[in-house]
Amino acid sequence: KQGEANIPVVSSIYCSTGSLTPELRREYLRYDGYGNPVYLCNDHSRHTVYIWGYRGKHLIAQIDNATYEEVKQALGNILPESFSVQAAPDMISIDNLRSSLSARVYLYLYTTHWHDFGNYTGWSYYILRI
């Protein structure tokens, strides 16, 4: 399967033991333009939405037990993958998901580290589980 930017992406994962018929375990239903998974379903029932930011480089939210449409509606009909292209994502909209969804929401907050001489040294992140 090809993603939006002609990036090869996985569409599904099947598992089996021995000679048993492979069973669908995970389905990747949507990707952003960077090839990051945005919406997947595990075992035909457990839905997860991932929201990426910082131009597709960092995960900013994981929403378990909510469908893509539920998350989109909670964001005011904004596509979850639209946050991927933002250099500095709108974390207020993402934070509002905690009160507008009956789902488990994990927020990932990033900070940059700079050396005394102005040299960039990396990122660190904090996970808030609500």
Image (cartoon, rainbow, N blue to C red):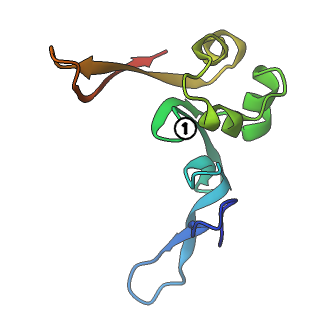
Give the residue displayed 62% in from the left and 58% down from the top. Answer: 28
Q: Amino acid at mark 1?
A: Arg
What residue occupies the far front of the structure in this picture? 117
Give the residue displayed 64% in from the left and 31% down from the top. Answer: 83
Give the residue displayed 57% in from the left and 70% down from the top. Answer: 8
Q: Horizontal placement of 70 versus 34: left or right?
A: right
Q: Secondary structure at mark 1?
A: loop
The picture places residue 86, in percent across and down from the top left corner, at 61, 30
Which of the two residues, 91 or 85, is positioned nearer the viewer here? 85
Rendered position, 36 above or below 104:
below
* Residue under numbered circle 1: 55
In the picture, residue 74 is in which quadrant? top right
What residue occupies the far bottom of the structure in this picture? 19
The picture places residue 91, in percent across and down from the top left corner, at 58, 15
Which of the two residues, 53 or 72, is positioned nearer the viewer here? 53
Give the residue displayed 62% in from the left and 50% down from the top. Answer: 40
